[in-house]
Image (tube, rainbow, N blue to C red):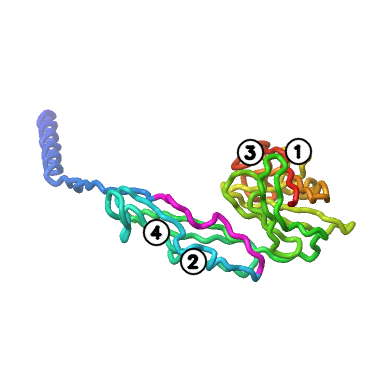
Amino acid sequence: MKNKILLLSSLLACCVFIIAACHKIEDNDSTVVTTSIPFIVIQNINDAYVYGAGQTSIYSDIPNVVAVAVDTLVGFEGGYGGKTGSDSIQILKSDITGWPDTVGLGGKSVTFEKFNKANFKVAISSNIVIAGPIANPGPTAMEGTYKRTANGVLIELKKVFDGVYVIDNPGGAAVAPFPYLFYNYKNALGGDSLAFPIQSNPCAGGLQLVAPGAPLSLTSAEYSAQHPPAITATSPLTVSWKVFEFPAARASSGHTGVALCQWGTGVRTFEKQ
């Protein structure tokens, strides 16, 4: 009897297996989908723009063709040239994702984007900084051209308001310009007090100008309070500082003791021309 039960169980199991096999759901046919991620090959927009309040001209300053993107695998709708006949595309000013408030003070950003035929996005962004006037500008007019004493490279301090300036090459070397705000306040004795608060740099970190004798590895807030850049001579007007970089553009960010993006940690001195 026991053997008959085992035989019956085996037959039932076999039937279940056969039925399951007959009702097996076949996998869907696989389709190879060609995908590609486009990239920027030409950038016409600046990495950043700095303005004084009420002086914004961002709409006219941004070029009509912001950049050119390329995708050599699938191309773009409305694209041109290359292997696919549509490899390249112009990213236009009109391809902006949304205009920010360019009246209120502070930092903002603008982003422009396109999608390739596989619906992958390529985007390019720029920072916008709107600066306001200060109540107590220092007595010395800082605007003008300065020559770095070590290599003869010329840089410029552009006036935004009294005591408020833009500098786009704080290290005096052959790098792409990137604008930063530079301040000259009147101190308690009526003299000049330079200031350069930490600001975003092209590598998505922070940058700050500090005193020529400033030590390494402090926080940005400590440099602001104790080690600002300095006027070291008045005839000709001479300024001196170190260019320190930080992992983030925050007052609490600590200097790592090394160069992170574009600049070394040595002293840089500039004479007004």
4 vs 1, front mark? 4
The residue identified by callout 3 is 259
The image position of residue 17, as x and y in percent, is: 14, 39
The residue identified by callout 1 is 215
Q: Residues within 10 Å of mark 1 (few under 14, many from 20)?
A: some
The image position of residue 263, as x and y in percent, is: 63, 41
Of the two numbered discs 4 and 1 on the same chain, state the one appearing first in sequence.
4
257 to 55, vertically: above or below: above
The residue identified by callout 2 is 98
Judging depth in this view, the residue of 190 and 248 nearest the camera is 190
Q: CA distance from mark 4 to mark 1?
A: 47 Å
Q: Residue at x 12, y 36 (%)?
A: 14
Q: Is residue 222 visible?
A: no
Q: Which mark is residue 90?
A: 4
Which residue type does callout 1 highlight? Answer: Pro
Q: Residues within 10 Å of mark 3 (few under 14, many from 20)?
A: some
Disc 3 and disc 1 in contact, CB within 8 angstroms: no
2 vs 3, front mark? 3
Q: Residues within 10 Å of mark 4 (few under 14, many from 20)?
A: some
Q: Quadrant of residue 183?
A: bottom right
Q: CA distance from mark 3 to mark 4?
A: 35 Å
Q: Is residue 43 magenta?
A: yes
Identify the secondary structure beneath mark 2: loop
